[in-house]
Image: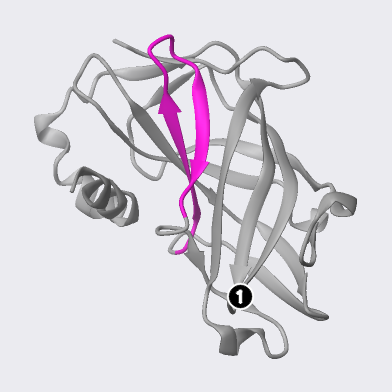
Amino acid sequence: MRYRLRLGLMAASCAVLLSFATSAATARRFSLNNPHFRISWPELRITIGGVTVRCPVRFEGAFHSRTISKVCGQLIGYIETAGVTEASCTNGGARVLSESLPWHVRYHSFTGTLPTITEIRVMVVGLRMSFNILGVTCLVATTATEPLYLEGDVEPNGELRIFISEEVNQIAFGGALCEFAGKARFAGIGEAFVGGTNERITVRLIL
């Protein structure tokens, strides 16, 4: 039940979420140990028409500040570079359309009981990638109404583990023959690091 509720909140619009803001501590913010980040997925899974491509994927970028206000939809940073280790892909291939970078990172919501947070969620808008499946190239693009949701599970010490849930991340795609296969489903578990290091990204709630 809790998992289904969490998925519903992730899919909710900012307008709906903001209607609950009056009961929350709106003056509180999140504090990050470093604004520069690197997120790595050893295996990001993209399923299109019943076929699943698996590839190592990384995103790198920066938040505008070390502090983030709890305002749904607010632009909080950019993904400046992204890459796929194509040689390690299985069941097909994938490629980042680098001309679409940078991609927007927007705050969505969090869960937990103040002052403790257990999850923080952001949206990636503007992502453009192509996938080769059974010799067919499909294009995926995320928008403000159909973003890629990244969910950060917050460990007791504040460290983030990044989840992509296919139940939420079902995104339309284009290309010859692709639109007949339904939506692309993204899923995977990644780790968040300070850009260029092996130091983990941590997040805390502050006044």
- Say which of 3 and 193 sits in front: 3
Q: Which amino acid type is marked by label 1?
A: Phe
Please tell me which residue is depicted at 29% across the width and 10% down the height of the picture: 207
Q: Is residue 186 above or below residue 49?
A: above
Q: Is residue 157 above or below residue 62?
A: above
In this picture, residue 119 sits left or right of residue 27: right
Q: Is residue 158 above or below residue 21?
A: above
Q: In the rendered structure, which segment of residues is drawn in magenta?
A: 146-165
**Residue 96 visible, this angle:** no
Identify the main secondary structure in magenta. strand
Name the image quarter holding residue 100.
bottom right
Residue 23 horizontal/vertical position (percent):
9, 31
Q: Is residue 134 above or below residue 126?
A: below
Please tell me which residue is depicted at 57% across the width and 84% down the height of the picture: 181
**Residue where numbered disc 1 is placed:** 173
In this picture, residue 192 sits left or right of residue 106: right
Q: Secondary structure at mark 1?
A: strand
**Residue 78 visible, this angle:** yes
In this picture, residue 24 sits left or right of residue 15: left
